[in-house]
Image: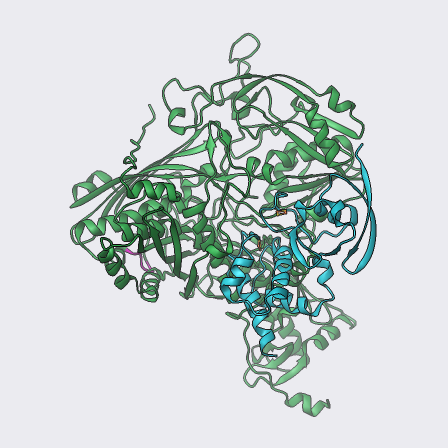
Amino acid sequence: MSLKHDIEFTLNGVKRRVSVDVTMNALAMLREVIGLTGTKYGCGEGECGACTIQVDGVSLNSCLMFAVDCDGRNVTTIEGLANDSKADALRESFVEHGAVQCGFCTPGMIMQADHMLHKHAHPDEACVKRGLEGNLCRCTGYKKIVDAVVACGAAEVTP
Amino acid sequence: MNVAEKKARVIEPDSLIGKRIPKMDAPEKASGRTRYIHDINLSGQLYGKILRSARIHALIKSIDVSAARALPGVHVVITAADIPDQRPIGVAKDHFPLKVGRVRSQRDEIAAVAAESEEIAEAALKLIKVEYEDLPVISNPEDAIKPGAALIHPEPHGADGSHLHLKQGMSIAHKGKPDNIAMRFDYVHGDVVQGEAESDVVVEDTFKLHYVTHCCMGVSGMIAEFDASGNVLMYSNTQVPFLHKREFAEYLNIDPARIRIIQPPIGGGFGSKLDIYPFEVICLYLARAAKRPVKMLFTREEEFLASPTRQPVLLTLRSGCKKDGTLTFRQVHTLHDNGAYTSWGATTPFVMMQTFSSLYRVPHCDYHTAAVYTNNPYAGSFRGYGNLQATFAIEQHMDMLAEKIGMDPLEFRLKNAQDAGEVTGQGMSFKSCGFKDCITTAAKRSDYARKARENAANRDKPGNIKRGIGMASMLHVGGGAKIYPSDGCGTILKMDDFANVTLITGASEIGQGSETVLSQLVCEELGLPISAVTVVNNDTAITPWDVGVHASRTTFIAGNSAIGAAKKAKSKILAVAAKKYGTAEDELDLRGGFVIQAASGEVVVELSKLLRNLHFQDKAELVMTTFYYEPPSVHQDKGFKGDVSAAYAWGSQVVEVEVDTDTGIVRMTKVTGAHDVGRVLNRLGIEGQIEGGVVMGQGYALTEDLLIQNGVMKNPNFRDYKLVTAPEIPEMDIAFIESMDGEGPQGAKGVGEAPSICIAAATANAIANATGVRMFELPFTPEKVYRALHGQTPKLYWKPWKAE
Ligand code: FES
Ligand code: FES
């Protein structure tokens, strides 16, 4: 029915070659073609951040990116942070600070926060709040998420 | 370690209660590994999609599905005509999952498809042709009760135009309704006429509450599968698995024993999964017809259109007091917009009337609600269950009455606040009550009195930013709510030979952290670390019966049930140990994974070793216990009187705002809360519940507004429906009042719904403090506030309506 296109890219450190529908977005490719379900669908319109991934080191909404545009790029999803010690500390901080309730927003929050901590190693509260503005959470009221990210950045100052 | 050393070892007392215990499932969730319903796929699965009405109110003249059926990859297409045995669903049994002959709202389900892929299912929907004949749309509840108003559920006629075909006792879906009134609630204690006669001051105002919706981050979905013998397996995010099993069985006309519900982790609940919705039954129909598993997931737009809302309410309140500050009466009339069908939203007056009758001591109270049918979205249950609306009116009147008699609003509240030991006009009996502590603590921590004085004095000074501070308080059930004949929960607890516990509880987890709190309570009894517990809480084939997650009941009810099972396990273990070591049971205790001497803390034996000995012996035994907890509350009588909950939760919240008088923008700067939670069990968890609830309340007060015009939803997306984002949250200072409830698990009471209840009311009071202008209509958007500040808002008045 629809047109397919072959692309090759690096996903979580591993080279992949997949054939995707040209109209498909990166979120659907990750979840349905590749089978990595940590990246979530919350709105499909770039409004909630549940689908946040990193492409060439920049965080973006995978629901707004065509799958074919992953060609030749370096894509990281929440699953790709499994062996990353910096991300370990961030995950741990989310757990310890009670930043996870239903958890549906959490992978997107962590992808965004991880990106933020790479750009600003020690963000203050206002910076974290601004950085997470595009990620919606209905459960926590954000406070514990912000605390978790600030604490993770601060922990690196005092080894 | 040699034996002598081990014997000498002493285990110090330790407790998990009140500690900050991370949520047990958080590591999985934070690594993206948790499989929500969206992430589960069964082999052979088809994808279901629903065709919804293109009209708001219309007769369905014809449906042509032939082109859809012919599309390659389509397995099943169904309409009402294909399911002749459809049973009506909903709280009032007033609609069919697939609509028959008539659509009454934008969301109405007309046909459904199961296909090889979502894309094919969507393409098939586009091929379905429906002919409609439009009917007049009623989108304003005030119009719905006018004499001669068009009926939303008219009585159907037989082929000869008669009503004779209608049998007695049939549901509204079958026999219709002669008016648009879905439900009425009338409650009285005392005599408001006498109350008014005793009053020195009387105020009367109309308040208008708007549409908002849950916005769970995970959209709704379900997977249904029938096995070869006709047994049904459902993956569902219901909050009420056991009661719903029975209902689903009725809709499928099968034995409830054939239904098994597995509840995968949920992407948010907040009351939205308390009812059965058409899509769930339709998904079952599709799976039954296709003989394949069918998965159905909403899009975000569909989630807005077709999941429940909080009920919009028009409310006129008349309140009075004496010059000395004694409240005399309250008279309340409300008009609830029920939407096209009846879900739990219609029954929120149960909770609203409690707040009117019993938050403060009111000798005379008169409460009336009519929930009326319109062609709008239908309202369900939503965290707080009517209490946000009731509190919005009451707490503004508390400030207004205090002002009229020239009394300090804190003193006025304290004078009328409930105390422990009181039984209210509605029959609620307050055993533990920290209400006055809540008021004084919230006021003190926020420096309420000084700030309120200064803000009022600064009102007329130059500058466009005005600061305001406002208070509101709440009462909510905190020990379950006996709305069914039982309000119980079962627990099965088993211990393995490594002293690990499997806690099998009827209580569903919907993200609120129940699994962690229940584990803590069990560990407290058995002297084990939290890591020793595995919780099983999501499979009706395994878990014991429970009424469901609602009414802030889980910690209290399931907690007491878990404690009951753990206590039984403990006494069995101690009996075995006492016998084996020749001592008395009451001289032993469990601590840190050991059986110890209660007095000295000296180790007697490692618990796992004792359990292994028990298993591996001639007359082997297991430590496996069950417990069913039923709270000592009562089912209310026909007049809504009775002690419906085993405990009641209290709270006061102080909101601080900055109002920009040039733009009407209200910024919420700080929320100070004091909550009587009985006792803090998990500090991290309870803070999270409160903070999340505060921000949900902030959205209700300031940003969220589901716009319905002529029955059409105008903003079914996150761009135009504004949830609060991280930079907008207020500073939060939360205090806990520990009133140690005698019946509560370790003294605790429920708190899940409490934190969102007061925010809108306190914000209204804060805006009044900042500007001198009262806001009677939510939400406080810049436009509304600007207009009110510039005298452009006509006085809202709804004349209480009486049925003929
Ligand atoms: S799903 Fe991509 S932003 Fe919401
Ligand atoms: S934890 Fe539920 S949406 Fe954020």
- Is residue B496 located in the magenta-colored stretch of the structure? no
Type of secondary structure dominating the magenta stretch: loop
**What's drawn in magenta, residue-wise?**
B417-421
Q: Colour of chain A?
A: cyan
Q: Give A143 or B75, whichever is nearer the viewer.
A: A143
Residue found 24% across the figure and 57% down from its top: B458
The quarter in which the C terminus of chain B is drawn is: top left
Left or right, B431 with reference to B408: right
Q: Give B250 or B355, whichever is nearer the viewer.
A: B355
Colour green, chain = B
Can you tell me which quadrant of the image ligand 2 is in? bottom right
What is the x, y in percent for residue B197?
Answer: 16, 41
Q: Quadrant of residue B433?
A: bottom left
Q: Give B671 or A65, whichever is nearer the viewer.
A: A65
Residue found 28% across the figure and 54% down from its top: B463
Image vertical order of residue B320 relative to residue A10, above or below: above
Image vertical order of residue B69 relative to residue A25, above or below: above
